[in-house]
Each structure stands twice: as structure tokens, then as C-alpha cells.
Image: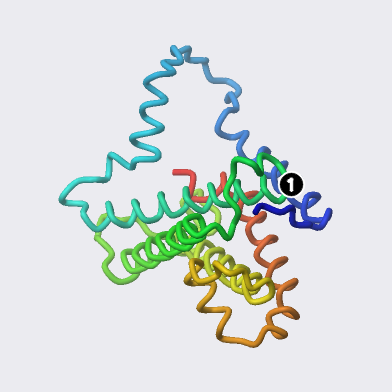
Amino acid sequence: MNDVTHVPTLFYVVAVAALIVFAYHLRALTSVRIGQGEHFRSLRLLAQLKNAVFIGVGQQRIYRKRFAYAAVMHFLLAWGFIELLFATTVDFFVTRGWFISFLPDKDKPWFAAMNELGGLMLLAGVAMALIRRHGLKPATLPQNAFAGRAHLLGDTGILLLLMLLVCGGFLSEAARLAVEQPVTAGYSFVGHSLARLGPTDWWARAQPAIWWSHAVLSLAFIAVLPTTKMLH
């Protein structure tokens, strides 16, 4: 059964601030450059929607035999991120008590397992990307670890941030499972395994710090997202 979980008001204040910063950075994608002529193009909504689905979400351009490693890597990154975004959105709605008759509870077996799989996919994609940039780097692949190339955090920094987010999510889930001990905890197989590494009282003391650190890092990621390579 779905329940409404209390979230501190301060979280929503910080979340609104993060969204404002996100919108501020996103303006660069839609702003008109002063002194340049305007180019009027038809919207071609159907074509743009097709590109968004097949190229943006489906990663169609990279699924080629000669880019097999990159194709698998991008698949894991894209779909792992999409699944976790979906899970976070559902969790937000349920926490606020919205649409709880239609949305799954976070401890629903299939939903819990899917969320763990999404986190592992993203983590595997990040690991493959780090290996590709620092172990199996093609000569033609541009690389600037932490700055430059007009991207905040560079090519490596954003990957490390994603890794921290995924690991923080697993730790936050582990703390919740250790404290709440739902009967379906085993379906959250990563979080449940981590929860068993420490006593319940330790997780209970650490839970606020773990939750807040993950929440703040996630909101910071949202705020700076348009300035990173993730937007490519």
C-alpha cells in the first residue's frame, strides 16, 4: 500500500532554487544572439519528435558495428539514467500523495527490482565510459578531464559525479531498508545487500546525513546539467 512520506520543507526550497539555476543555464539554448539575422524554419513537430525518440532516447546514431563498445556504453548510460529519472519522478509523486492509486509503491517487487537494475546499468555505463577515456581511448576521441571544451566538469568530472549519484542512491536506499525493513526488501537487491553490512542502529543514525548528501548532490546536478556534457 502506498503511503505519504514526510520530506523536509527545506528540501523543496533548495529544489526550487536548483530549478531556477537550471532554467537560467538553459536559456543559452533558446536565446537569440544579438547582431545575427534570424533564421525562420518550420517547426516540423513530427520530425523533431521522431528524432527525439530514435536519436535522443533510442541512441540510433551510435548503434553501428564499428562503434559496438560505444553503443553498449551509451545504451547503458541513456537507459539507466531514464529509468532512474522515471523512478525518482514516481517517488516524488507518491511522496506528495499524488496519483497514489495508480503509481507503484517504492517497495513493490517489480518496481524495486527495476530501480536496482537502472542504477546498475548507469553505473556500468559510467565505468565503461571511464575505461574508454582513460584505458582504451581512441586517438580521435577528444578528452579534457575536468575542464575545458565548454563543458563544466569536463569529460571525466561529469562521469565521476554520476558515479557518486548512483552510489549515493544505493546507500540512501540501504539506509531506508535497514530502518523500515519492508517485507519485500530483498527485491531491492543492491540496497538490501548493503543494508546487511551494518547494524540497524548505525543506519538509523546515518540515514539523515546520507539522505541529505544524496539530495543536495542530486539537486546540484540538476542545476548545472545544461552546462555539462550530459546535454550533448
Q: Is residue 213 left or right of residue 226?
A: right
Identify the image quadrant of the C terminus. top left
Q: Residues within 10 Å of mark 1 (few under 14, many from 20)?
A: some
Name the residue: 59% across, 44% down. Answer: 103
Residue 65 screen position, x and y as percent: 16, 50
Q: Which color mode does the image show?
A: rainbow
Query: What kind of residue is marked 1?
Result: Arg
Q: Is residue 88 left or right of residue 159?
A: right
Identify the image quadrant of the N terminus. bottom right
Name the residue: 53% across, 47% down. Answer: 86
Between 16 and 86, the residue placed more toward the observer is: 86
Between 192 and 49, the residue placed more toward the observer is: 192
Decide: is 66 above or below 121.
above
Decide: is 136 above or below 80.
below
Assign a secondary structure to mark 1. helix
Residue 170 screen position, x and y as percent: 55, 69
Between 138 and 158, the residue placed more toward the observer is: 158
Q: Is residue 129 left or right of residue 214?
A: left
Residue at far left of view: 65
Between 51 and 208, the residue placed more toward the observer is: 208
Name the residue: 70% across, 41% down. Answer: 98
Name the residue: 36% across, 29% down. Answer: 51
| Residue on which disc 1 sits | 96
Decide: is 59 above or below 165.
above
Residue 123 screen position, x and y as percent: 43, 65
Residue 48 screen position, x and y as percent: 41, 24
